[in-house]
Image (spheres, grey):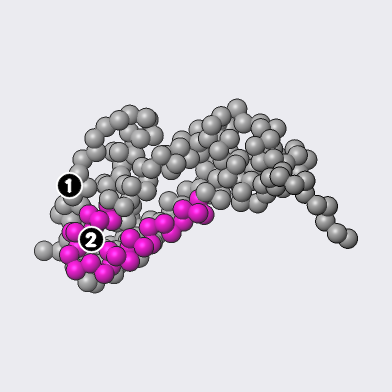
Amino acid sequence: MTATPRTPGRPAGRTGDALLDTAREVFLEYGYAGTSMDEVARRARISKASLYREHASKSALYAAVVGQWAIAGRGAMRPALVELKASRDLRKGLIALGETLRAGMLSAPVIAMRRLVIAEAAAQPQVARDYLAQSWDTNIHDLAEAMVQLAEAHGLRVDDADALASEFTWLVVGAPLNAGLLGVERVAPPVDRAVDLFLAGYLRR
């Protein structure tokens, strides 16, 4: 059987990851409640029947969108961690990592997705749990593994690597992330202050 030729000049409809990208744009624009499968299908240039064949409901589509986003961001900090582990100056290496963390976590797309997931967390808690596990928890674990190596190379005191990685992350991004989620423009304290506080508590003297 031969495929039916597409009408010349007519763009192909979006499926797979491209469809999820389109759906994410709609969810971010209208929120979960304001998003309709009709609008997603229209923007993806597919029929609503085709959309439902890929995603059986709006909630299933939403879960797929959030899951795709979380997986795409999983391990995003690994290149920066490679540089940190190779750094001879621990303080400078941590400052560079902190700047990278802020740039990534405070970017407009990341803030927008966090707001979307937070807004729907009560109604769809499993999606929120999966988002946390696949993105935040994975990156924290990657940083924890780097902290163990830093302990050996620089005398960093590591009793609980995951807790240490989490504390470092919140010292660096906590205040500006909170302001960003609330849409408040506020000058964040320099990363080096957070790093100095972290080292004061965990660097062996």
> Which of these two is toward me, 35 or 197?
35
Left or right, 25 with reference to 46:
left
- Residue 161 spot, x, y in % from top left: 32, 61
Left or right, 97 with reference to 70:
left
Where disc 1 sits, the SS reads helix
User: Which of pointers 2 and 1 indicates the residue nearer the eye?
Assistant: 2
Indicate which disc, 2 or 1, sits on the residue closer to the N terminus: 2
Q: Give the quadrant of residue 126.
A: top right
Confirm whether residue 168 shows in the render.
Answer: no
Secondary structure mostly taken by the magenta-highlighted segment of the chain: helix
In the rendered image of this protein, does residue 115 appear above or below residue 95? above
Q: Does the magenta segment cover residue 56?
A: no
Say whether marks 2 and 1 touch (CB < 8 Å). Answer: no
Confirm whether residue 183 shows in the render.
Answer: yes
Q: What amino acid type should be assigned to the residue bearing mark 1?
A: Arg
Q: What amino acid type should be assigned to the residue bearing mark 2?
A: Gly
Where disc 2 sits, the SS reads helix
Q: Residue at x 11, y 63 (%)?
A: 205
Q: Residue at x 65, y 51 (%)?
A: 16
Number of the label disc, if any, that sits on residue 93: 2
- Residue 197 spot, x, y in % from top left: 17, 50
Q: Which residues are magenta?
A: 70-98
Number of the label disc, if any, that sits on residue 193: 1
In the rendered image of this protein, does residue 1 appear above or below residue 107? below
**Name of the residue lying farthest toward the front:** 8
- Residue 97 spot, x, y in % from top left: 28, 56
Q: Residue at x 43, y 51 (%)?
A: 136
